[in-house]
Image: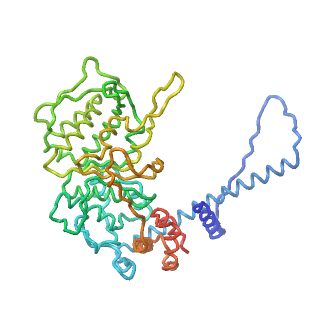
Amino acid sequence: MLKSIIRSAVSAKNQSNLKNALIPTTINIQSSNYASKTPKKKSVNPKQAQKSKKKNEIITKSDDNFVSDEVSISVEEESRSRHLAEDVNNKALDVGPNGRPLFTKTQTLSQLDRNDVCSYMSFDMEALNATLPEGLPTGMAKEFEESKRTALLIRQSFLDLRDNYRRIVDPPLQSSGDRKPRKQILLDGPVSSGKSIALAMLVHWAREEGWLVFYVPEGKSWTHGGFFYKNEQTDLWDTPLQATNILQDFLKYNESRLQQLPCHIFDAIPLGEGAGVGKRRGVDSMAIPEGSTLYDLIQTGIFHTHAAVGVLVRLREELSLVKDVPVLFAIDQYNSWYTFSEFEEAATARSTSPIHANKIATVSVYRPMTHNDMMVGAFSNSTAVGKLRRDLPNVPTNARVDFPRYGLDEAATVCHYYLRQRLIMREAFSEEKWKKIYYLANGNGSEMRWLAPLIR
C-alpha cells in the first residue's frame, strides 16, 4: 500500500517535469470488416458513444504516462551512471557518518574486526562469482544492481556468526568470557534483515579459510521442479534431476579438494529410477571401487542418473567422516524444507495429495541438525512458507538465532553509502530525512533502498 501511494506521487512529479518533452502518443486504428454484401448501418446510442470515447481517452493518457515514466527513468539512470564513472576515483566522497571512512581498507573477511563494523567492503565481482559459483542471493544481487557497486555493509551480527564457527575450529581464540560456540545455528528474523547475505558472506569466509562448504543458496529448488519417483525400498521420493544439479554445484568450487579426500564407505550405491528413463533392468546397485575419492563418488552420480540420489545421500555420510579439513553445511531457504513440496501423489482415482518435504529422500538426509557437524541454515521469507513453530523437528532448541534488521548506526552508514552512489540527491540529504526513511521502513534493508531515491 505504502509503495503504491509513493509510486503514484513520483509518477505525477515525473509527468510534470516532462510536460515539455516530445512523447509519441498512442494511435487508435479502426479496422473494418469486409464482406461480399453491403453491411447494414447500425444505430449507435449517443450515451454509449460518449462513454466509449472517454474510455479511449483514459487509455491513451495512461499509455502516455507509462511512456513518460520509462523515458524519465532511462534518462536518470544514464545520468547517474555517467556521474558515478566520473566520481570513481574521488576519495573525498567516501565519507560516512561523523566523517568516518565509508569503506574499510581491510582486504579479506577473515581480517575484519569491530573497527570495521558499519563500513562497507568492496568485492571483485569476478572473484565473488568464482567463490560462490552456486549463485548469489537475490538480495545481494539486487543491492549490487541498484547501488551500481559491488560492496556490502559489514555488520556486527555477521562478525558474531563468523567468530562462532572460527572458535569451533580454533578453540584457543575463545576467551573465558565468551559463550560456548554452537555447531548448529538457524538464522531467523523479519523479512529483509540480511540473513541470506550473511550466510553467503559466511560461506565466502569459510572457503577463504580453506574449509569444505556444502552451500545450498536455494533450498526450495530441492522440492520444486523436475522428475520425482516413489522409491519402494525406502518409501521416500527420489528426485534424480535435482540430485544431479546439486552434485554439479558442489563440484564447482570444491573439485580440487574433493580429489584429495578418500571415501570411507564402500558399500554399493542403490540405484533408483533415472530422470525420465525409468529403472535399469536387472541392476539394483552400483559398486564403489576401493581407493575411490569423494570426487570419484560425485562423478558417479553425475554421469549415472540412476545413481544420483543414492550418491547424494551417501555424500552426506561421507562428509561427516572428513577429518582433514573443516566441513560446513550452509542451507538457505531452510524453512522450505518444513512445508509441502510442489509434488503430488495420487490419493484416490480422482484426487491427489501434496508430498511433504520430509518425504523427499535428499531433504530427509540433509535437513536434520541433530548431529555433531557444523551446520547453519537461514529462513527466507521469499519462499512464502509462513511462520513456523519455534520448536522444529530435528533442530536443537538453542539453534535458533534472531537476525536483526538495520539499527540506527547501520542505517546512517547505509544512507551515506546511497548518497555516495547517487541514489540520494546530495542537495536534499539531511539527517532528518534519512532518519525518516529508516523509521518508515522499520530497518527493512530493501525498503530503505527503495525509499532512498524519494528523498527530495
Q: Residue at x 18, y 37 (%)?
A: 296
Rendering coords of residue 398 (x, y %): 32, 55
The C terminus lies in which quarter of the figure?
bottom right
Using residue 59 as the reference point, say whether residue 143 is left or right of it. Answer: left
- The colour mode here is rainbow
Rendering coords of residue 77 (x, y %): 49, 65
Q: Is residue 199 above or below residue 353?
A: below
Name the residue nearer the viewer: 343 or 251: 343
Res 96 visible: yes
Name the residue nearer the viewer: 50 or 256: 256
Using residue 314 as the reference point, say whether residue 47 is left or right of it. Answer: right
Name the residue nearer the viewer: 12 or 184: 184
The N terminus lies in which quarter of the figure?
bottom right
Rendering coords of residue 360 (x, y %): 36, 35
Q: Is residue 200 above or below residue 238?
A: below
Quarter assignment of residue 205: bottom left
